[in-house]
Image (cartoon, helix red, strand yellow):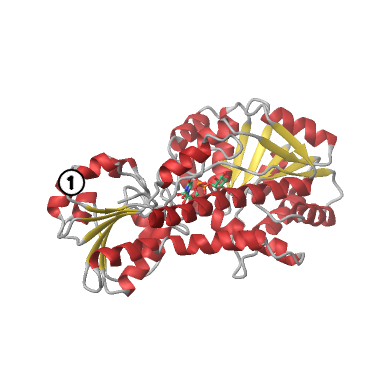
């Protein structure tokens, strides 16, 4: 099939590359000419394992191309994937400006029947809004479908090729057939729904996963007080198939471009129809506070933090990505410097993005985990990169001022710590 993808962010680029790899002819469109030039040169603007190789391979095979010319891309395609950003407005609502603009541009460029398949995360009713924008500008036939995306950063390629399910929200038989065919090689589980339910499935899924994380984080906080081990508790819970073991890793809370934005948006969507989503509000509040446990544990270990040097390992919101959007590290480092600490920060790939994410004073940017740890009064692990898991803790302990380790992701085993003199704090596990 001929497919055009509008927007080359995470979702757009990964979808475009993967559909090309399945043998379709794909054109990826972006307004940003510089970005298009880089993509044409084989440069990927994000860190995502395996993406660049797959992109270069499919571009070389002539199945994948990049352009900033929306009309050309629209005219060539039978399926147009909408994958533009829906960032948060100050009140938490999704900003639909880019969606609306893309819908207008598609309408004005159309030369025949098109299927517009929305992958951007959009509030319930948005696809109907897209339909009415396009219908107001063209008489040509078209259909709009909601096909939400469930890929995770860091494992985007494998998530796209092996999704747990594909959801197709449509009221058109043609779309149902075409999009089922398009996704048939990817998933056995294809669920056809109405458009509004598909839109809701995306928000409900992310909100539910966020709920699991905040739930296990609160259980961890209680475990710390009653002397239980949250990793064992989570394992015991997870064996129950009704609960499932995924997303029960306690830590410093969720970040990233999706959960914080989508939970806020769902609270707003509910509020717009006068429903007070109390549970989800609590999930968000628990998440906002969880990261500050790192500071509380530092205070317990060191007392007054003013004048202390604190090493930070990990800035990205999760491993295998350079994305720092809503990363817990942002607020943790902000609070540490506000309390008068000097911070020595290191991340294997997210350093540059993190530096650009704010105005950080009293932060020393380190080029290795050892240089961050050297002469520090405490070390905080905030992202569970493999590199940190393999660290030689005996050596790290020697080069630090004081052997204090706050493991925000439960990366180290008791046995590994027992070989050191670290004053060790993890999340929800007995010290
Ligand atoms: C999330 C969803 O998992 C995807 O299904 C969805 O497509 C995506 O949002 C989206 O809406 O685009 P992502 O944000 O890339 O994917 O990353 P996750 O692996 O879900 O992790 C999110 C955050 O939760 C991270 O900060 C991670 O550290 C945290 N987390 C995850 C935990 O604290 N504990 C866990 O057990 C799992």
Q: Identify the residue at image location x=57%, y=52%.
A: 211
Classify the position of the N terminus by image quarter. top right
Residue behind mark 1: 420
- Residue sticking out furthest to the front: 226
Quadrant of residue 12 within the rendered picture: top right
Q: Is residue 3 left or right of residue 129?
A: left
Viewer-proximal residue among 303 and 30: 303
* Occupied quadrant, residue 354: bottom left
In the rendered image, the vertical position of residue 243 relative to residue 421, given as above or below: above
Query: As drawn, is 244 to the left or to the right of 420?
Result: right
Q: Position of residue 290 (x, y in %)?
A: 44, 60
Q: Quadrant of residue 231?
A: top left
How packed mark 1 is, by other alpha carbons closer than 10 Å (few <14, some 14-19, many 20 or more), is some
Q: Nearer the viewer, residue 92 or 135?
A: 92
Residue 63 visible here: no
Q: Residue at x 63, y 47 (%)?
A: 205
What residue is rendered at 58% in x and 62% in y? 282
Looking at the image, residue 401 lies above or below residue 145: below
Residue 97 image offset from top left, x and y in percent: 66, 62
271 versus 184 height, above or below: below
Q: Relative to residue 294, is residue 1 drawn left or right?
A: right
Does 329 sit left or right of 398 as displayed?
Answer: right
Give me the residue at 72% from left, 53% from top. Answer: 103
């Amino acid at each position: 099939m001929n497919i055009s993808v509008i927007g080359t962010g995470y979702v757009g680029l990964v979808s475009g590359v993967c559909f090309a790899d399945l043998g379709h002819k794909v054109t990826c469109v972006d307004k940003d000419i510089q970005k298009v030039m880089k993509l044409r040169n084989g440069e990927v603007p994000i860190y995502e394992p395996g993406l660049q190789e797959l992109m270069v391979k499919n571009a070389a095979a002539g199945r994948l191309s990049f352009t900033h010319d929306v009309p050309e891309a629209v005219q060539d395609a039978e399926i147009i994937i909408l994958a533009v950003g829906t960032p948060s407005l100050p009140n938490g609502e999704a900003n639909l400006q880019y969606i609306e603009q893309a819908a207008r541009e598609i309408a004005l460029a159309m030369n025949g029947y098109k299927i517009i398949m929305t992958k951007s995360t959009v509030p319930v009713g948005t696809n109907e809004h897209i339909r009415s924008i396009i219908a107001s500008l063209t008489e040509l036939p078209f259909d709009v479908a909601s096909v939400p995306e469930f890929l995770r950063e860091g494992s985007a390629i494998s998530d796209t090729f092996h999704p747990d399910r594909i959801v197709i929200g449509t009221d058109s038989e043609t779309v149902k057939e075409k999009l089922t065919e398009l996704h048939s090689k990817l998933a056995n589980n294809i669920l056809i729904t109405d458009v509004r339910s598909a839109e809701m499935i995306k928000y409900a899924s992310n909100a539910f996963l966020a709920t699991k994380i905040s739930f296990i984080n609160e259980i961890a906080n209680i475990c710390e007080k009653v002397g239980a081990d949250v990793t064992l508790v989570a394992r015991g819970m997870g064996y129950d198939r009704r609960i499932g073991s995924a997303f029960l890793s306690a830590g410093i809370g969720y970040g990233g471009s999706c959960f914080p934005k989508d939970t806020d948006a769902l609270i707003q969507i509910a509020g717009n129809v006068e429903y007070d989503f109390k549970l989800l509000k609590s999930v968000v509040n628990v998440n906002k506070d969880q990261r500050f446990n790192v500071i509380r544990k530092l205070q317990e270990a060191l007392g007054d933090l003013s004048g202390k040097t604190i090493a930070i390992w990990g800035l990205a919101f999760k491993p295998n990505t350079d994305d720092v959007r809503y990363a817990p590290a942002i607020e943790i480092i902000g609070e540490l410097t506000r309390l008068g600490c000097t911070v020595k920060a290191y991340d294997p790939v997210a350093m540059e993005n993190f530096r650009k994410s704010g105005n950080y004073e009293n932060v020393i940017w380190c080029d290795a985990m050892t240089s961050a740890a050297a002469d520090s009064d405490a070390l905080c692990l905030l992202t569970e990169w493999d590199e940190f898991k393999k660290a030689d803790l005996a050596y790290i302990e020697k080069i630090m001022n004081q052997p204090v380790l706050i493991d925000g992701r439960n990366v180290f085993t008791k046995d590994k710590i027992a070989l050191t003199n670290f004053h060790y704090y993890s999340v929800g596990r007995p010290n």
